[in-house]
Amino acid sequence: MVQMTSVVAVLLMASQLSIANSQMDITPCGRLKGCLFAPPGCNPSADCGIQFSYQVNEAFLNMELAGTPPSQIGYIAVGFSQDDKMVDVFFFHSSKYERMNEVE
């Protein structure tokens, strides 16, 4: 599995927007792709509110972000930083505005 040195991934939850419930295939986790789950200690196949996977494919980073915020108004996001202070964070979020899902 590819080491992600000097990159910190953070899973965030906030109460701003709404997102649909979804699940990702966790079978390849640890073998073909790296996976992170939240909250800490959750069971990935049962009760994780957020699921994030990553896979390096030559020059590309493939990511999946799935989950359900704890309220109807919320979003999920993943951020990348070169330090543990999360300065100059580059992040992706998945949110829902009315009836249109958006990934940035």
Image (cartoon, rainbow, N blue to C red):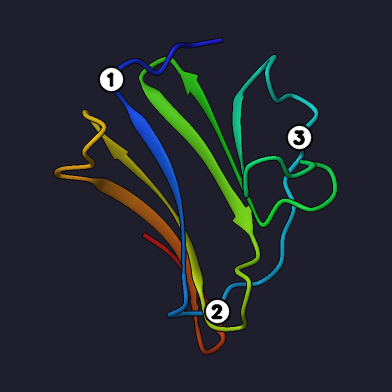
> Which secondary structure, mark 1?
loop
Query: What is the x, y in percent for residue 64?
Result: 57, 43
Residue at the image position 63 percent from the left and 72 percent from the top: 70
* Left or right: residue 84 compared with residue 77: left
The quadrant in which residue 87 appears is top left
> Which secondary structure, mark 3?
loop
Q: Are marks 1 and 2 in contact (CB under 8 Å)?
A: no
* Image quadrant in which the C terminus is located: bottom left
Which badge, 1 or 2, is on the more N-terminal residue? 1
Residue at the image position 35 percent from the left and 31 percent from the top: 8
Q: Is residue 86 above or below residue 60?
A: below
- Residue at the spot of label 2: 18
Q: Amino acid at mark 2?
A: Ser
Question: In the displayed image of the protein, which residue is found farthest to the bottom?
Answer: 98
Mark number, residue 99:
none
Query: What is the x, y in percent for residue 41?
Result: 70, 40
Is residue 89 or residue 60 the one in the foreground? 89
Q: Nearer the viewer, mark 1 or mark 2?
A: 1
Which badge, 3 or 1, is on the more N-terminal residue? 1
Distance from the alpha carbon under mark 3 to that under mark 1: 25 Å
Q: Is residue 2 above or below residue 29?
A: above
Mark number, residue 26:
3
The quadrant in which residue 73 appears is bottom right
Is residue 103 or residue 81 the one in the foreground? 81
> Which secondary structure, mark 2?
loop
* Left or right: residue 71 compared with residue 41: left
Q: Is residue 77 above or below residue 71?
A: above
Q: Amino acid at mark 1?
A: Ser
Question: In the displayed image of the protein, which residue is found farthest to the left?
Answer: 88
Q: Amino acid at mark 3?
A: Ile
